Amino acid sequence: MANLAIEAVGLRKSYRDKTGEKVVLDGIDLAVPEATIFSLLGPNGAGKTTTVQILSTLTRADAGQIHVAGHDLAHRPDDVRGAIGVTGQYSAVDKLLTGQENLLLMADLKHLPRRDGKRKAAELLERFDLVEAARKPASTYSGGMQRRLDLAMTLVGDPRLIFLDEPTTGLDPRSRRAMWDIVRQLVTDNGVTIFLTTQYLEEADQLADHIALLDHGHLIAEGTPDELKRLIPGGHVSLRFTDDDTLTNALTTLGRGFLDPSDDDRLTLQIPSDGGVASLRDLLTHLHTAGIEPADLAVHTPDLDDVFLTLTGQTPTHNPAHNPAHNPADTDDRANSNDRKQEIAR
């Protein structure tokens, strides 16, 4: 088994409010291999930010055995802080400082020697294509540039594990895809582990090696994006044939299926399927044995939006402000992102 960047067993957290005790995390287990991208999804208020806060040492768990970057979280939190970085939903960039000054500030907080701090800042400015804007106030940066600077600040301490909490909120599609490329490079080129929470399900689909779906404090589904999609009915295999006779023979041989209503030529047959390798192999073997060869084949599975809606009963929202439900611990993410990053840096 691969080495684990995060291993949590029986993680629990609750809060008290006017209505009494509210259980936010109810004994969840997590196993995140090193040098992978793990995405934690769930409706607003499901406990995603609380999970990140606990794993990044900002909030104590009520119960559970937790190891982060090989360190026992309860007994060696300083070692955990030295091995991780956090980029929150809201930028931690100080907009009164220049990009270079923001990076040098983080280098000071990491207690790097002045020469090493300057060298690291220069490397990151180059890597994140911020050299020309290095001496300009961050307030003049675009949203995408501020996000890149925010992530660069996280990398000053060479973390082995990075928590990305809603990292592309508010970015335009082009900037979002640029951020995706940076995240992939961190994993492939540097062996960094990424723990990602996001409201953009396409983002999780594009990036994550493994996804866990959190709802009401429970993990209700886990797997690769493709494995989760196969949990939901509606998947099918489309088989296109060259003529009516072959299509009819295929339908008779298989004993199931229906014509694709979007095909004006009426030569495409849709066969319900989970899209898995085994079921696809059985389907093609059955046709081959009968001497029937389709001209074209395509596998269609539900997307993560379908998975999210079916398993949680909620439509995913790409703007957290649209859903007022929240955990008590989630509210400080808007105001204290910079303080939290600096606390971990110390």
Image (cartoon, helix red, strand yellow):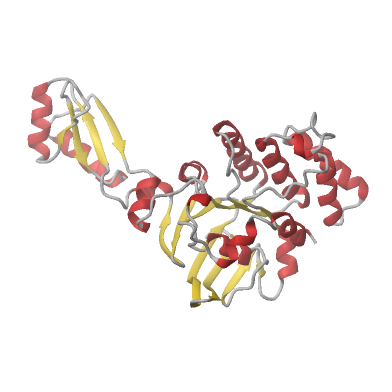
Which is more toward the observer, 226 or 57? 57
The residue lying at 65 percent from left, 44 percent from top is 186
Q: Is residue 84 above or below residue 19?
A: above
Image position, residue 95 (x, y; %): 77, 43
Residue 292 visible at all: yes
Residue 6 visible at all: no
Image position, residue 88 (x, y; %): 64, 52
Q: Is residue 47 above or below residue 37?
A: below
Q: Is residue 111 above or below residue 169?
A: below
* Quarter holding residue 82: bottom right
The residue lying at 83 percent from left, 38 percent from top is 122
Total label count?
Answer: 0
**Position of 92 compared to 251: left or right?**
right
Which is more toward the observer, 289 or 88? 88
Residue closest to the far right? 114
Image position, residue 223 (x, y; %): 42, 54
Image position, residue 55 (x, y; %): 62, 65
**Position of 238 compared to 78: left or right?**
left
The residue lying at 59 percent from left, 71 percent from top is 66
Q: Quadrant of the C terminus?
A: bottom right
**Position of 215 compared to 183: left or right?**
left
The residue lying at 30 percent from left, 38 percent from top is 300
